Image (spheres, rainbow, N blue to C red):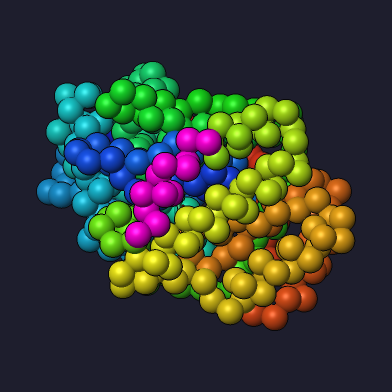
Amino acid sequence: MPEILAATAVAHPNVALIKYWGKRPGPGNLPATGSLSIVLGGLATTTTVTFDPALAADEVSVNGAADADTAQRVSACLDELRGLAGNPARARVDSRNDFPTGAGLASSASGFAALVVAGAGALGLRLPEARLADLARRGSGSAPRSLYGGFALLRNAGDGTTCEPVADPADWPLEVVVAVTTRGPKPVGSRNGMAQSELTSPYYPAWIATHPADLDAGLAAVRGRDFAALAELAEHNCLKMHAVMMTTRPPLIYWSPGTLAALQAVRELRAGGVPVFFTIDAGPQVKAVCLPGAADRVAAALAATSGVIDVLRSPLGGAARLLSPGA
Ligand code: DP6
């Protein structure tokens, strides 16, 4: 009787403080720029991978459903793992998020981080962290960052990337308040959006040219625990990315009216002395990053902001982990 192999892993979504937008040419889903992120320990993706020789094809389900593009990316990742293990069995993948999927909360990052950890665990593969990160990146460019806890740095290196932890949550226990302004999937996925930006935004070359300085300064701010410097820089880097998005043809406007209202609320809080800054990804949610003592006030202000339909709170979290190896 052929063996059924299963494992479950948990990974947390991450938010980039210094972002990537754009790919390098060639295979491997290589980002054009580096990035620096934090993981949100209060939100989680749990993924079970079951390799079953009786299956004729991979079966992928994300919160009970999955689009063809995601299923194809998952199968490509599993193909690599099958090749490494010398096991051709197809797999059932069941992935669940406890937060809104596809709306700028980086479910693909935590999804692919959990997928590679669970897939490798099920197959009994003991892969070096760098190999897991490479596999996760092929699925989603931001996924290697979700393999690590706390602050993670993803950098271009030669014809690949490296990803490393920069600080633990305990080293600098920031809190994140997410202002949810719209539910539902984003209109244009990151991958297609980036390709269009590269082709059509006149600001794309400036984004690429100025990015290394942002990344170096962001890293220095995290290492020096300099919240004021990080706040100014992260907001600048975020708005520069959105300027590229908005000047793409056709335009990529991920914001809703509530996004702008939440962004202004964060700016007003900071002007009033509250240590908080905003960041926004390819979606309408605003992530307010704050020093721990400020999170109550930030959450209350955002909950009272017009267009904000929900507020989620999260401390920083730990690395992706295997829950249940074996069948
Ligand atoms: C705006 O990593 O989701 O969140 O590789 O196509 O899955 P794919 O892209 P993805 O892009 C993330 C873009 C971003 C910025 C960031 O997280 O750095």
Q: In the image, which residues are magenta?
A: 202-213
Residue situated in front as seen by the camera: 134 or 263:
263
- In percent of width and height, residue 244 lies at 42, 59
Q: In which quarter of the image is the C terminus?
A: top left
Any part of residue 237 in sight: yes
**What residue do we see at 21% from left, 51% from top?**
72
Q: In this view, does 128 lie to the left or right of 87?
A: right
Q: In which quarter of the image is the N terminus?
A: top left
**What residue do we see at 68% from left, 49% from top?**
232
Q: In this view, does 135 lie above or below 140?
A: above
Q: In this view, does 303 lie above or below 165?
A: below
- In percent of width and height, residue 7 lies at 39, 36
Residue situated in front as seen by the camera: 103 or 198:
198
- In percent of width and height, residue 172 lies at 74, 34
Q: In this view, does 323 lie above or below 232?
A: above
Q: Quadrant of residue 260?
A: bottom right
**What residue do we see at 41% from left, 26% from top?**
162
**What residue do we see at 41% from left, 63% from top?**
245
- In percent of width and height, residue 219 lies at 60, 31
Q: Is residue 19 left or right of residue 267?
A: left
Residue situated in front as seen by the camera: 260 or 211:
211
Does 85 lie within the magenta span? no
Does 207 lie within the magenta span? yes
Q: In which quarter of the image is residue 99?
A: bottom right
